[in-house]
Structures are given as structure tokens and as C-alpha cells.
Amino acid sequence: MANNLVIVESPAKAKTIQKYLGNDFTVMSSYGHIRDLCDKGMAIDIENEFTPEYCVSKDKKTLVKELKAAAKKAEKVWLASDEDREGEAIAWHLSEALELKEENTERIVFNEITKTAILRAVENPRKINKELVDAQQARRVLDRLVGYELSPVLWKSIKRGLSAGRVQSVAVRLIVEKEREIEAHTPEASFKVSGIFTDGSISFKADISNGFPTQEAAQSFLQNCAGANFIVESVEMRPGKRSPAAPFTTSTLQQEASRKLGYSVSQTMTLAQRLYEAGHITYMRTDSFNLSNDAITGIAQHVEAHFGPEYHQVRKFSTKSKGAQEAHEAIRPTNFSKTIAGADDRQKRLYDLIYKRTIASQMADAKLENTTIKLANENAPSAERFTARGQVITFDGFIKVYTEGTDEENAETVDGQLPAVKEGDRLSYTEITATQRFTKHTPRYTEASLVKKLEELGIGRPSTYAPTISTIQKRDYVIKDSLEGNQRDYQVLTLNAAGLSAATATETYGADKNKLFPTDIGRVVTDFLTEHYKLIMDYQFTAKAEQNFDTIAEGQVRWQDSIQDFYSQFHPLIEQAPQGGKASRLLGEEPGTGEPVYVKLARYGFVFQIGDGDEETKPRFKKLPPNVGFYDATLEMALREEVLPRTVGTYKDLEIKANVGRYGPYVMWNKKFYSLTEDTPEEVSLAKAIQVIEEKEAGAANNIIAEFTEEPIIQILKGRYGPYIKSGGNNYKIPKGTEAESLDRAGCEELMAAGPTKRRRGRK
């Protein structure tokens, strides 16, 4: 046994560090936390200043014995867990559980796993920071108090097996409120006017900034434009610039990896953890934008060598987060000469994102020339002006390496060449259109945009974002899903050389991909907690709790006093908790009997209940229609005769059934669903059902790019988000840059073998 024992959190990290320290050191892993609050009971002595009771995890008892034996043989033990509060708590728990002597124990921290950083840490050890440990203890105790006391209230009032949490319940509330905002949205139509103009050599697009409220108003405007020339009223040219984004923090990495790579929050953190443990990037849980002097020097050398000195600009970014934890660095590569790193393609793509973002943060601004041209109708000087905007990049600067993504859906870019016109020039139009457009509801949250919102509200810290989002999905309060969208008509008015014409076009609206939707049980729990436990569901209160943890970490307040302040407000609410009564909604009365009709949460899901029942009579219960939830149920559904699903007939020897689902009436055939837009499921005829099926199937046939009919059948299909391969009921992605039309059967089989399937998941 070597004289020095180093204990780290993960075996991958242990392997990397061992090669840097040599034979005088033995590096072992604790595999994360070795102990936590005991599972039996609350494990918190409330009467004795909230003293926590810790237990070694069952699956770690053998490991603890091995670590304790190794520690006894070593002359010195080095605790090298991560440098944040969680890591400090792990170091303290190791010290306690292994019964380490303070004089023989050193605490070392590093934010990158490189030889230089490891040796520097060994040369500069310190003792365990008890304030950081107390901040983590306070978080754990507070979360246990909330969960342990509040969850049983949910079991009595709603359903067994439910849970509540200080951060998770607030996160679900955000998603529920967003969905209700969307449901309350009423689209408002207006006509957006744009035109194609020319000076005889260059054609360009110009728009009217304000929409016209009615088709009549838009038509009148176009009629005034008929045959007119347009005068250049003004030409404004001004220089502009764009500056690079700061290097990555935990939340911005999660957001950008979602936008550009399609990674989930938990997937991003797992991949970043692997890159960190392999020594490729700095520590991945941070809310600091800071870069070390060594990093700034390394980036400067790289930029000047590869792009020239004019592309380099030293920048210092300040951290915006009020409660930024400890003096971490931003997430960056550890070696700027290494342009590719990672054990697999997913890690390499994430490393590439981190590498380019970090390099770009120390590069010069992009210089732009913005041009704005305003055009006035020569025949109607008082009419609305057309405005054309162009943007020319005169120096690309940081854009040469990296451009930040955006959460804005259908974000318009302003870029293009405009003619060299001057004030007073006369231009003609090629075409002017007035297109009916509808206001859109606020976008739903993605995992990444939810992280951004939590961070803006001051809720949670870098280490909590991914676990919170995973928890609310595991609890079935929230699902990540996609919507196909619906069809609607819109009007287009066109003015060109042939005159003014009107046409009707069709568009898909309401489609959403990989967004977070609240489940019915998530809504019910949110409504209950918001009504009875405003304290827990209050955004400011939850943010204040995070600030309290920060003050504990700074040694400004005892953690027990902070918990006592919270508990004195929280516990009385538990004692006043509503007793009994499951979640229910009164829908109305049954005609004739006058008995109340409810939709209720029963043991195995939501049901209709007719009547309250008494000693002599029991209430009657009916199932909800398929895909109908607690908040969708209506009195008409409850009173409908039990005739659905209804067998309409057969088509090609397969049965057709009609029913009502969450998104309206439909017929089902060959395990596929076809929406009914004109007929009810009770009355739709066999002929009409077949017509609906055939029309939908004909449309699907147009989406087939190629088909290989030998078993197993393989199809290349057009999808909403690009072409994909379908075989055996599974969908497979076609990588970007691969031409779907050029694939043969062998090429499809190769992609199917190599690539993951596209998961198809229905709404709950």
C-alpha cells in the first residue's frame, strides 16, 4: 500500500489521476455519495436543532469497509471530491464515515483533471470547509422536511405514491401555467404585406411593419399600389457590431446543446461528466463566466496563430447570477491545441461546441454594415411605407468560429444585398402580397428553456437543474412530447402584372417538437399545492431559500437558524392540511334525477361519478373516453350512452371503429387513427369512414421517397422534420448531409444498424 491514499468520486477520474501522481499514491473511488439521510423515518431530530441522522447506503457498506481499511494503512488521506458544495459534503461524509484523523487528512480541489492542476492541488491542500458542508446539509434537510411532511398530505387528498418537492413542485407549476396560458390564447388574424421591388438590376424584399386588421383593408392598400412607382424616401446606412457570447456555464451549455445538438439536459451533463473525468474540459457544474489567466493566454496564442492578431480581443465576462457558487471557472477545454476530444461521437460533438464557444469568447467583434431603405407609394404619399433591411458583414471576427443559437421559433434573419439607391430614386414592384397571419401562443418550455427560466428566477443551482427535470418526468407530472399540429386555411392577396388576385392556401399550425407538457396528475397536484401551500409554490420564496444557502456557505448564518425560520412558517400549514377528499370537478347535473355529475380521481385513474350516494344507494361510475383527461372531461361525455367505441364496419378485411379521443372524434383502422371533421363517431357511415381513411392514406403515399418491398420492408419517408427510414414499426434517423434519394437498401440497413431509432410516443 502506498503512503498516500487519494479518494475521488468516480472510477474514471481515479484512473486519470493515478497516472499523474505515480506510485507513491493509491487512488480509489467513493462512487459518489457514500451516505445520506437514513431512509427510515424522517431522520431529522426537529427538537434538537434539526440534527440529521445519516446512514451509509446499503450498496456502499462493502466499499466503506475497503476504504476504511485502506485509510488505516495510509500515512495521509487526500479527499479529492469535486470542488462545489456537493463535493465538499462528500469529503465531509467520507471523513466522518471512515473516522479519519484531521491531522492525517487533507482536502484538495481542482477544476480540471490535468497533471499541472493535480500537482498544484497536492502542493496546496486545505481542510474541509464546514460552511460549504453546512450549506449542503441545509439544502438536504430542507428538502427532506418538505417531502416527508407534504407527501402524505398528497396521499390523503389526491392519490398514494405522489410526492412534492421544494424545487420540483415549482418547476411543474411553471409548466402548468405555461400550458394554461397557451390554452387561453385566441389567435387573432391580420394581413402582413410584403413586396418584391427592383431598380432594374437587383430585386429585393421590403415589408410593411404594421399588419392590416382585415382582408378589406389589405385589399384596399394593394389596390392603391396597383401600377404605382415607389420613391426611395430615405436610405440609412450605419455601422454595427456583434459581440461573442460568454464561455459556457452549466445552464448555458445545457441550453446550447439542446438547440444545436438536440441533447436533453441529463444527456448533456452525462457527456460533460465523461469529458471532465477524461481531462478534456474543466468542471462542468459552474455558474461562473471566469477564465483563468492561463486559459486566456492559451486562447490568444491559438487565435493569433490560426486567424491573425486582428481576430483576437481579450474579454472579461462578469457573472450575472446573484448566488454564483464559489470561484469556479467557466466550462472550457483544458488544452487548446486539442481540437477534437471525446470517446464517442456524442462526446466529440459536445467538446467541439465547448471548444468553439470558448475560443470565440476571446475573439474580436464582427463588424456589420446595416442598411435601411424606406419606400413611399408615389400615388399615395400618406400610405404605409415599405421598409427593406440589409446587413453586410464587413469583418467576420468571432463569427468565423461560432455563432450562438436562439430559442426564438421562426426567428427572422436580416441579411442580404440591397441595391445602391439614393433618396428620390424611383423603383417598380414585381409583386406585392398580403398574407393572412395568425398570432401565436407563447412557446412551451423545452428542457433547456425551463432551465433558463429557473435560473432567471433564482431557483436551483448548477447541480440541481438536471436532477429536477428528470424527477418531474419520472413522477409523471410532466412528459416530453411532440404534437403533429392541425390544418387551417389562410388567405393570400397577390398584386402583380396580371392584376390583383385572391387565393386560399393551407398551413399546419400548433405543431410542437420535444416540448414539456403537464399531465393531468401534474395539474391536479399543482392546483392543490397552490391553493393550500402558497409558501412552497411561491417563486420568490423558493429563490430566497437558495439565497439562504449562499449566506450559510459564506458563514453569515447558522444553518439550523435558517431551517428553523422556514419550518416555523411551513409546519403550521401541514397541521391545517385539508382532510380526505380526492381531486374532483363538478360537471353539472344529470337531467331528470338532478344528481350531481363529477369527474374524479379514483384508485386506478380518472372516472365519472354520478350521484353522491348514501346508506341505501351507491354512486354510479363510468370510464372516461380514451385519451380524455381530468380537465378535458365534459358533462356531455359523462351522459353519453355507452356506445363507444362503435364498430362501423370492415375495410379490406379489417375492422373500422369510431370513438372520441382527447383531440376529438376519430375512426381507427389497421391500428391507425383518422380524425373526423364532419361526422360524429355515433353517426359516421361506413362509406364516409372509408373515404376519410383513403384520403389520409393517399396523402401518406405522397410522402414515400423510396420503398424496398422485400422482407423486411423498408421505406424512406418524408417527415415534418426531414426524411427518415421506417421498418418493422420503428423509425430511424437519416444523418444531416445524407441525401435520402440516393440511399439503396444496403445503405438503409447500414444506417438502421448504426443509428438509434426515433422514439414515437403518444400524449398521455
Image (spheres, rainbow, N blue to C red):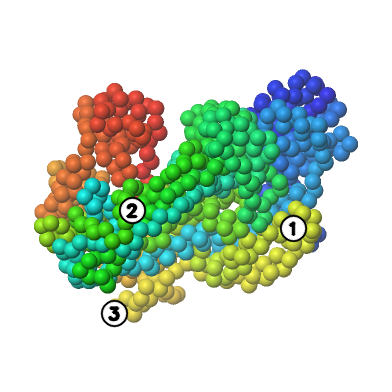
Whether residue 110 sits left or right of residue 489 in the image: it is: right
Q: Is residue 72 visible from the viewing direction of this image?
A: no
- Identified at 57% across, 38% down, the residue is 312
Residue topped by disc 1: 551
User: Badge 3: few (under 14), some or many (20 or more) residues near its Cα, within 10 Å?
Assistant: few
Nearest the viewer among 210 and 95 is 210
State the CA–CA distance, disc 2 to disc 1.
45 Å
Cβ–Cβ below 8 Å for labels 2 and 3? no
- Identified at 20% across, 57% down, the residue is 428
Residue topped by disc 2: 511
Helix, strand or loop at mark 3: loop
Q: Amino acid at mark 2?
A: Ala
State the CA–CA distance, disc 3 to disc 1.
64 Å
Cβ–Cβ below 8 Å for labels 2 and 1? no
Whether residue 298 sits left or right of residue 609 in the image: it is: right
Whether residue 355 sits left or right of residue 518 in the image: it is: right
Residue topped by disc 3: 592
> In terms of sequence position, does the residue under pointer 2 or pointer 1 come before the other?
2
